[in-house]
Image: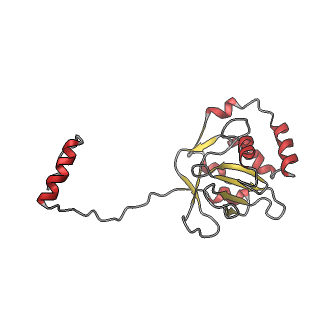
Amino acid sequence: MDIKRFNDFISFSKVKEDNRNYDINSFLDTVKERMGRLPATDLLDFVSEYGFASFNTDMIVTPMEKQEHSDYFVVGAFLGFGNTAVSIEKSIGMFYSDEQIGMKFFPICEGASGDLIIYSLEEQSFGKVYYWSHDSAIGGDTFLIAESFDDFIGRIEARKEEKDDREVVGVKYSPRLLKLINEKRMKDGLPPLVQ
């Protein structure tokens, strides 16, 4: 796992320090009881070290299969061991249900606003990493992004700035329309347009 390449992009929140006395073993016993198994130790070790870390720049991951709406998914803050709003415990409690994420999972990190990146604890897909979109229809809301946790880490990359190649078009108003627009702008406290 080549997480060290991200060290320049990562910062830790105060939340990690606030949860230093959290009983991780007791929580993992609860996860095993509820989900039937635990994730591989490399993921647990990762959470212990990088939990509650976030990227200082926009990071993305490309899904394994082409998506209709986007070529990539956002990779947000890593969840940590604790009992706070951005913790693994809270995410499991909030999202593990038939109405939310119907599969057995272990959350890794946040995605775009309200989404999660999760590690499958299901028998047939154990260890695969999925992106769960809270806006998608139930049953079509998880997207495979990596075959393993190590593969997921290797697929994360900094989002490249998209170049805007749109041409700036000038608009020519008729004198009458320009007068009407400027009257409205003056009422709204805006300066007049000039041509």
- Residue closer to the observer: 177 or 115: 177
- Residue closer to the observer: 58 or 181: 181
Check the picture and name the quadrant holding the C terminus. bottom left
- Residue closer to the observer: 78 or 130: 130
Q: Residue at point 66% right, 38% down?
A: 85
Number of numbered markers = 0
Point out residue 63 in the picture as x, y percentages from the top left corner.
62, 64
Check the picture and name the quadrant holding the N terminus. bottom right
Image quadrant in which you'd find residue 79: top right
Q: Residue at point 17% right, 47% down?
A: 183
Point out residue 107 in the picture as x, y percentages from the top left corner.
72, 49
55 left or right, relative to 143 = left
Q: Residue at point 73% right, 31% down?
A: 20
92 left or right, relative to 75 = right
Point out residue 106 in the picture as x, y percentages from the top left corner.
75, 50
83 over 59 or under it: above or below: above
Point out residue 41 in the picture as x, y percentages from the top left corner.
81, 49
Judged from this view, the residue extending furthest toward the left is 175
40 left or right, relative to 162 = right
